[in-house]
Amino acid sequence: MGFSFSGHIGLLGQFLAGRQQIVDDIDRRLLSVRGKATAQGTDRGFFDDILSNCFFESPAVSPEGSRLKGQLAAAHLAEGFDPGPAADYSREVDPVGLVRYAQHVWDRDRWPGRNGRIAYAQSLYAVFVLRQLAHLSLRIWDEGSHLASKRLQQVQRLLDLLNTAGAPPLVRDARWLIQIAQGPLTTHLKPYFVIADRVAGSLMDRDRREIHKAGAALAGGHLRSQL
């Protein structure tokens, strides 16, 4: 079965429609766990499974949507974006890392009450969905370059919905997601040139300029962070 762009548009729409249910589940399963076994876990995969299940096992998500779990990440790897060697941390927008960091800090200081945890759960929700949207932005060419602009607009509409909750948006422009999805260091360089060729061959001038502007800004920020 091939990758379904429309299926993932529908899935992310369900994530957005079920936002409050998912946020409450993130709090219940990952943040209101002081003194429980979940708070003692150290394995990244353990937390990754729980967080993913908060989304894909949500009552807001259809059985068809649940079956799409893992397909975006698999398509990203199949494109050639194989992460380079790293320690036990992620080089990209990483909700799992944020869960582990919060539990570490709260254990050291104090665990927040429900209002504080829900605010943090909202942030975890936004980062998770943003990561899904970033990976989806690289799939706009999957069924032909003639669909790329239309599909990028579909990603933008979902991003706009994500940004309507009142918190400051993490990203406003879907064109920047194309660069965010390519942010982590990878083993091979070829995928970056493939995406650059697709951008050059299918999108309008204003879109190409904004995508390359995003690349320059994000690369500059990355180099500064390393210094």
Image: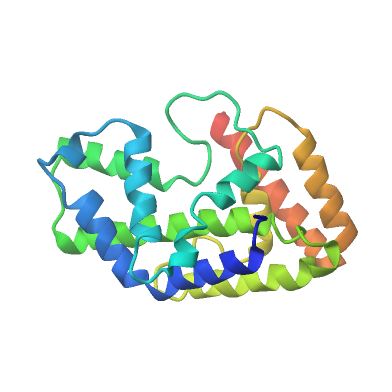
Residue 100: quadrant of the picture: top left
Q: Nearer the viewer, residue 70 or 220?
A: 70
**Viewed as shown, does residue 141 lie left or right of 32?**
right
Is 36 situated left or right of 203 in this image?
Answer: left
Q: Position of residue 136 (x, y in %)?
A: 62, 58
Quadrant of the rendered structure where residue 126 is?
A: bottom left
Counting from the top left corner in percent of width and height, residue 220 is at 66, 41
Q: Nearer the viewer, residue 152 or 48?
A: 48
The percent position of residue 53, horizontal first and vertical second, equals: 35, 53
Residue reaching furthest to the right: 201
**Which residue sits at x=61%, y=53%?**
135
With 150 as the anchor, is 13 left or right in this view?
left
- For the point 42% across and 76% down, the residue is 17
Q: Quadrant of the N terminus?
A: bottom right
Q: Position of residue 227 (x, y in %)?
A: 57, 28
Q: Residue at x 45, y 55 (%)?
A: 127
Of 206 and 44, nearer the camera is: 44
Residue at the left extreme? 35
| Color scheme of the displayed model | rainbow
Residue 191 to residue 7: above or below: above
Above-or-below relation of 17 to 52? below
Residue 39 seen anywhere in this rendered image of the structure: yes
Q: Looking at the picture, does residue 163 appear above or below residue 124?
A: below
- Residue 98 visible in the picture: no
Quarter of the figure with residue 116: bottom left
Q: How many marks?
A: 0
